[in-house]
Image: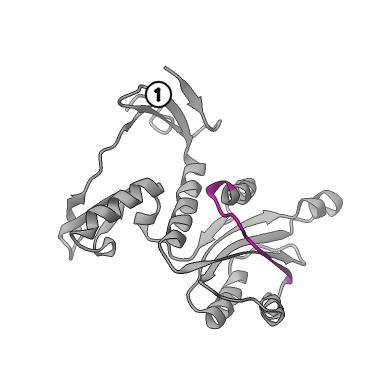
């Protein structure tokens, strides 16, 4: 029996495969960001948003407020319509080491509608939407979970009181593996739409009492091959 440790953390789950007996550990904090990253990628795959840009917004002064992004995103939506995006915050390391200032970069991966073209005018317009410093726009040729987690990992080093990651609306059913999502799409293709149900961890259900949200009636309940054998949040006991 092999054991694969993914992350070292004081808050983790140890999972065991029911058939092979393989075990590995999942860092609970990183697992959340991994699900958001998967949801972002899956939503792009199932949408018409195929043009992807990496936008880096740099602040001039030391301050923190995700609200700084609101004006920027509102301007982007007015100009380009439907957008799918994910953002993370990162402290400018060189400036921190040189001056001790905790000034932020905001990394935004943004997907635009298919065949959206970017001219010099577009670049200048996007730069004008950011009122707090510089804006750099680059094309992303190959997008993956690894690419996203590289920037999410930097955000994990920020103060826990700071919001480290955000995104446009990503429906719950997108936040699973692509293979699991494809199985769900095949299942619902002959039944109804994915959007018609409530989703939780890859499972779809309806409420028996939809007014008071009581009594879950599961419609789609895929087989789970992994079981939790240790949870660091459960006083170190087996569950």
Q: Residue at x 36, y 56 (%)?
A: 172
Depicted 230 relative to depicted 99: above or below: above
Quadrant containing the N terminus is: top left
Image position, residue 2 (x, y; %): 45, 19
Residue sitting at the far top: 1
Task: Give the image location of residue 15, x and y in percent.
Answer: 39, 29
Residue located at (21% from left, 54% from top): 205
Query: Could you say where residue 54 lies in the image, as x and y percent from the top left?
Result: 63, 62
Measuring 18% from the left and 52% from the top, which residue is drawn there? 219
- Residue at 28%, 52% (x, y): give it: 184
Q: Which residue is mark 1?
A: 22
Quarter-of-image position of residue 134 = bottom right
Residue numbers of the magenta segment: 133-146
Give the percent coordinates (x, y) of residue 176.
39, 48
Is 239 placed left or right of 91 in the picture? left
Comparing 61 with 6, the one in front is: 6
């Amino acid at each position: 029996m092999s054991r694969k440790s993914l992350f070292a953390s004081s808050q983790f789950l140890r999972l065991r495969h029911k058939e092979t007996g393989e075990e590995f550990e999942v860092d609970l904090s990183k697992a959340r960001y991994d699900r958001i990253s998967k949801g972002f990628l899956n939503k792009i795959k199932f949408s018409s948003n195929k043009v992807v840009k990496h936008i880096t917004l740099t602040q001039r002064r030391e301050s923190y407020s995700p609200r700084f992004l609101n004006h920027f995103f509102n301007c982007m939506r007015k100009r380009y319509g439907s957008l799918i995006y994910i953002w993370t915050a990162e402290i400018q390391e060189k400036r921190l080491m040189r001056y001790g200032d905790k000034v932020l970069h905001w990394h935004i991966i943004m997907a635009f509608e298919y065949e959206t073209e970017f001219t010099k005018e577009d670049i200048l317009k996007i730069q004008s939407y950011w009122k707090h410093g510089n804006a750099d726009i680059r094309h992303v040729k190959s997008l993956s979970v690894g690419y996203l987690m590289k920037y999410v990992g930097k955000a994990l080093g920020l103060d826990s009181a700071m919001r480290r990651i955000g995104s446009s609306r990503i429906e719950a059913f997108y936040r699973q593996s692509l293979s699991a999502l494809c199985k769900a799409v095949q299942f619902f293709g002959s039944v109804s739409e994915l959007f018609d149900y409530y989703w939780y961890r890859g499972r779809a259900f309806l409420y028996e009492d939809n007014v008071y949200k009581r009594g879950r009636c599961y419609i789609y309940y895929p087989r789970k091959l992994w079981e939790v054998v240790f949870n660091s949040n459960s006083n170190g006991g087996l569950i």
